[in-house]
Image: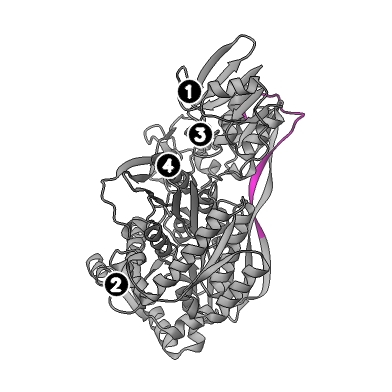
Amino acid sequence: MIIAIPVNENNAEPSICVSFGRAPWFLFHNTVTDETQIIKNPAANAEGGAGIKAAQFVVDHTANVLITVRGGENAAEVLLAADIQIYKAQGSTAKENLALFTEGKLEKLESFHAGFHHKQ
Amino acid sequence: MKIAVLSGKGGTGKTFVSVNLAVAVQSATYIDCDVEEPNGNLFLKPENVTVTTVHTLLPDFDADKCNGCRKCVDFCRFNALAFIKGKPKVFPEVCHSCGGCVLVCPVGAVTEHGHPVGRIENGAYGDISVVTGVLNLGEASAVPVIRAALADGLTGKRHSIIDCPPGSGCPVLESVSVSDYCVLVAEPTAFGLHNLQMVVEMVKMLNKPCGIVNNKMEDPYEPLEDYCRQSGIPVLCRIPYSETLATLNAAAQIAYEHDESSRTLFDTLLRRVEAEVKP
Amino acid sequence: MKKLLILSGKGGTGKTTTAAAFIGFAKAEAFADCDVDAPNLHLVIQMDSEPEQTAYYGSQKAMIQPEKCAGCGLCASACRFHAIRLEAGRYAVNEYACEGCGVCAHVCPQQAVTLEDDIAGTQTLYRGNRVFSTATLRMGRGNSGKLVTAVKTALTEAAPDKDLVIIDGSPGIGCPVIASISGVDLVLIVAEPSLSGISDMKRILKTAAILGTRAVVCVNKADVSLGNTEAIEQFCEAHDIPFVGRIPYDHQASVAINAGVSLADVPCPARDALQKVYAETMKQLQGGVA
């Protein structure tokens, strides 16, 4: 399966980003091949609809699981409609969270915040 | 003549000046463009009110015609569209109603429907037409409702008084752009002066003639007096702070109708504005 | 970290005056002015450091290259925002009305239209022991919701370890207000005892409720209308909204503001009342249930 995590840096041990929609990078880890890719988030500087665009990006990368600190309602709608499981992050690094996930210690993220309504 | 009343800072007395000016004119249209928090109707208490809904347009996607090319999703600069399980989906509060997705669809699968964002209330107070724009709670953009209020209100009557929102952003610009003259309501505080300077910049940029009303005057506030002198903008009148006015205002009473000095003041102000606009 | 946001619905009720007083009482080290249309907090808060200024980019704006324009007018007909006008035989974009949607660029048969970056405002950040984040929106620009969010983010990133953040909000109930409410722990509504003030207070309370954020209410200039003040108290009681106090009309407030001083530093009846409102608000902030 492919696990997606919003992260702050593009390096060997990136820290998890508190924002989903405007995270600078997304880490994608393939549990079958054990490969990890870190790709720039196209929604990072969006004026509006950042959560939607970031969620679309995650969906388009065929992720099955997302681990995040929080997420907005609109992002959640896109992710859940694409059958992506969303888990609440713990700890501060992507590595920690991948380990916790594998050990079955992460919980599902149940509540999402209202959109930021970035409209003129 | 279309007179816009604005201030930059909130609470300086835009509605107080707009409402009383409209009453001084008698046969006028009062248009409340502060659609997030419209208050003129509390004073003018309009009767025979009819309500029309203001809509923006939202896209609909015909699943049978859609070929999954995603041109609509890729075109949308507001990220209002997502592509989920082979179908485009719109997020209404992010959509700007630009119509782009309709245009780019190669198979004509996108149409639009009306989505309510607010309403216009049309009523009368004596001979005054009262037009109130109201933005629905949770809606982000005031501009479509302001546009609708102005379209409704600007008929052939003698004068239109446009009560503007606070600030100097898009909603204010929209409210002011159709006006012939701008009345700037200033209060004698550092905050008031700072925000006055911002709207003066806007009004000058739009090439609108303007004049200042100094409201809630107690002791003279020198920086405001200096600014008025240096800017060359005429001071149309000075309204002293008074408990009588504050109390009348708190009870949503129209000062012109209850207070002799207010009646004189607004009659004079009206004549002053008319004189400023005369070619 | 707890975030307190001060709103009012109606303009001119005393948000900034209250925010400045609270910042003084709390000796707060992290605060922001989210009224980006008309920021005023910096006029009563003295900062020692030089601020960092960053250009803020809002939506892009369309630009028509006059030499390529054939004057067909397809752009103007397609533009939903009335942002394109005819000038001397060529079409030109009004930068104030343009929303950067790209439809004009799409329909132009001459490829005469491009979308360009537009500086919509300036963000200002004071760093040091005290962190102050604010911004100004260029006139006529929208997108203030995004700028408000940028102001809040700049603050929490520069001061992640502070316990208390005080945010001065803007009037209204629209985009910038919605953006400022997002993620705060408590909203303090400074209400004015007038019919307008009550009507606007109700709208802002409903807005906070829609966004799932707790709110408490105080009344400023309470003695201008005791009847209306009581009506506000009763309304709060009936709707389970904590009422945190009354502040009397006090001429000292404008004198202090005009001298660029926070009310926290001026002994007067308004300050005494504000101190009680502050204490009650802090209790609500610290002790509240999410």
Q: CA distance from mark 4 to mark 2?
A: 51 Å
Span shown in magenta: B53-72
**Which one is closest to the eye, mark 4 or mark 2?**
4
Q: Which mark is residue A22?
A: 3
- Tell whether label 3 touches label 4 (CB within 8 Å): no
Residue designated by label 4:
C161
Q: CA distance from mark 4 to mark 1?
A: 21 Å
| Residue C114 versus residue B186 in the image, above or below | above
Q: What residue is at 51 percent from the left and 34 percent from the top?
A: A22
Describe the element under mark 4 as helix, strand or loop.
loop
Q: What residue is at 61 percent from the left and 76 percent from the top?
A: C231
Residue C191, image x and y in percent? Answer: 52, 68
Q: CA distance from mark 2 to mark 3?
A: 48 Å
First reached walking from the N terminus: tag 1 or tag 3:
1
Q: CA distance from mark 1 to mark 3?
A: 16 Å
Quadrant position of residue B152: bottom right
**Which one is closest to the eye, mark 4 or mark 1?**
4
Q: What amino acid does circle 4 point to?
A: Asp
Describe the element under mark 3 as helix, strand or loop.
loop
